[in-house]
């Protein structure tokens, strides 16, 4: 085997070992917040007799990935097939903390287990139960971004395709 061929073979083997040793990441962000989970389909029926049910059983989870408190106000959750992505309300999320962002109404708070809860104030379900047409199904966009079903301004995303009843998906 020639010296050039051996050098190329050794270089290829070294690159393959580096690739194996590099950990993969399931989710990523280019901002202060990261989508970590989504429950697009609350357990049970969404409506009964025209009344919306279990709105707060539909949620997504965000994590502050910085070493400082981040205000969630202005970040835009943008679903790829609708325009229900009004900006998140103002809430101070401590460094490293996670918050459940519920579809319905409630008082923003931190519970006794240290879990934060933020409410979007919708009177109807807004996360898609099924979507195999577009990918990803939910994007979190930086403050000031448009809810226009494009990736412009996206910092994190999550896809679940068809949502099983009451199932939470990792992003």
Image (tube, rainbow, N blue to C red):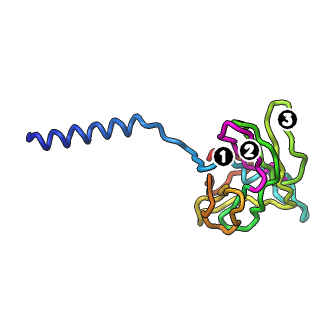
**In whole angstroms, how far apart are the C-alphas of marks 1 and 3?**
22 Å
* Towards the viewer: 70 or 83: 70
Estimate how packed mark 2 is, as few (under 14), some (14 to 19) or many (20 or more) residues with alpha carbons within 10 Å: many
Mark closest to the chain's N terminus, 1 or 3: 1
Estimate how packed mark 3 is, as few (under 14), some (14 to 19) or many (20 or more) residues with alpha carbons within 10 Å: few
Q: What residue sits right under mark 1 in the picture?
A: 32
In the picture shown, does residue 87 fall above or below 69? Answer: below
Left or right, 128 with reference to 133 = right
Q: Residue 63 in the image: x percent, y percent?
A: 69, 42
Mark closest to the chain's N terminus, 1 or 2: 1
Q: What residue sits right under mark 3 in the picture?
A: 111
In the picture shown, does residue 11 fall above or below 60? Answer: above
Depth check, mark 1 against mark 3: the one in front is 1
Outermost residue, top side: 113
Which element carries disc 3, helix, strand or loop? loop
Label 2 near label 1: C-beta < 8 Å? yes
Region of the chain picked out in magenta, as a range: 55-74
Q: What residue sits right under mark 2 in the picture?
A: 70
- Identify the residue at horizontal 33%, vertical 35% (top origin): 17
Which element carries disc 2, helix, strand or loop? strand
- Identify the residue at horizontal 80%, vertical 50% (top origin): 102
* Towards the viewer: 94 or 133: 94
**In whole angstroms, how far apart are the C-alphas of marks 1 and 2?**
7 Å
């Amino acid at each position: 085997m020639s010296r050039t061929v051996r050098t190329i073979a050794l270089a290829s083997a070294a690159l393959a070992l580096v690739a194996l040793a590099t950990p993969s990441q399931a989710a990523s962000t280019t901002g202060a917040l990261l989508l970590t989970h989504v429950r697009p389909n609350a357990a049970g029926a969404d409506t009964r007799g025209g009344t919306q049910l279990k709105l707060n059983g539909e949620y997504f989870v965000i994590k502050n990935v910085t070493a400082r408190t981040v205000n969630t106000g202005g970040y835009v959750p943008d679903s790829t097939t609708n325009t229900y992505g009004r900006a998140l309300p103002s809430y101070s999320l401590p460094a490293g903390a996670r918050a459940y962002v519920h579809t319905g109404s409630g008082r923003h708070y931190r519970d006794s287990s240290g879990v934060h809860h933020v409410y979007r104030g919708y009177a109807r379900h807004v996360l898609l139960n099924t979507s195999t047409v577009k990918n990803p199904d939910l994007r979190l966009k930086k403050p000031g971004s448009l809810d226009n079903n494009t990736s412009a301004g996206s910092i994190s995303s999550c896809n679940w395709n068809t949502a099983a009843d009451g199932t939470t998906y990792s992003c």
